[in-house]
Image (tube, grey):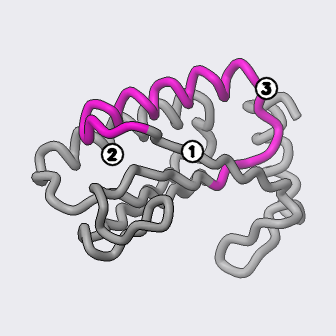
């Protein structure tokens, strides 16, 4: 169920994009294997559409990832995942100051196909078995 929004500069060729999303997926899946539904949306920003430190178009957009994930994974697992994500992004873009924001959600704040996940007892039990909480 992890969903990521990766903001990046334009220009990365398709093969490198494939490697990038596979590297991010691998890092995320190791920590969040259930369910196997990880979505990563790339949003490419042209040079003249990014302001950094108050200067428009001063440099390529520094990558930023917002990753929405289930609540309950321990800190060391998150650290390992973030190192893997960082390695994939650094390999693709070679830009400084890559930032990741993790947004964690309990199952009562997530719905799939209109149903709140916390209402699905089987889902709650399966996630508890995988994530330990």
Spatial CA span between label 1 and label 2: 15 Å
Element on which disc 1 rests = strand
Q: Residue furthest bottom?
A: 114
86 in the magenta segment: yes
Q: Main secondary structure of the magenta part?
A: helix
Q: Is residue 77 above or below residue 47?
A: above
Residue designated by label 2: 21
Q: Residue at x 61, y 30 (%)?
A: 31
Is the residue marked by circle 3 packed among few (<14), some (14-19), or many (20+) residues within 10 Å? few
On the image, which quarter does residue 42 sit in? bottom left
Part of the protein shown in magenta:
68-96
Q: Earlier in the sequence, mark 3 or mark 2?
A: 2
Residue designated by label 3: 74
Element on which disc 3 rests = loop
Is the residue marked by circle 2 packed among few (<14), some (14-19), or many (20+) residues within 10 Å? many
Q: Earlier in the sequence, mark 1 or mark 2?
A: 2
Element on which disc 2 rests = helix
Q: Residue at x 28, y 59 (%)?
A: 9
Spatial CA span between label 1 and label 3: 17 Å
- Horizontally, residue 70 falls left or right of residue 5, namely right
Query: Which mark is drawn over residue 38?
Result: none
Residue 11, x across and y down, in percent: 14, 58
Pick the quarter of the image with the C terminus.
Answer: top right
Residue 53, x across and y down, in percent: 49, 59
- Horizontally, residue 43 falls left or right of residue 16, namely right
Residue 44, x across and y down, in percent: 30, 66
Nearest the camera: 56 or 62?
Answer: 56
119 in the magenta segment: no
Q: Is residue 133 above or below residue 3?
A: above
Residue designated by label 1: 100
Nearest the camera: 37 or 61?
Answer: 61
Residue 14, x across and y down, in percent: 12, 53
């Amino acid at each position: 169920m992890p969903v990521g929004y990766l903001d990046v500069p334009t220009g990365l060729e398709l093969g490198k994009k494939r490697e990038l999303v596979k590297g991010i997926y691998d890092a995320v899946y190791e920590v969040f294997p259930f369910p196997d539904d990880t979505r990563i949306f790339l949003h490419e920003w042209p040079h003249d559409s990014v302001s950094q430190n108050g200067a428009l178009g001063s440099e390529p957009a520094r990558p930023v990832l917002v990753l929405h994930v289930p609540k309950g994974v321990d800190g060391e697992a998150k650290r390992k995942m973030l190192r893997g994500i960082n390695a994939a992004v650094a390999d693709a873009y070679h830009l400084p100051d890559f930032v990741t924001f993790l947004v964690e959600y309990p199952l009562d704040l997530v719905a799939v196909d209109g149903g709140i996940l916390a209402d699905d007892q089987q889902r709650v039990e399966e996630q508890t078995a995988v994530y330990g909480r």
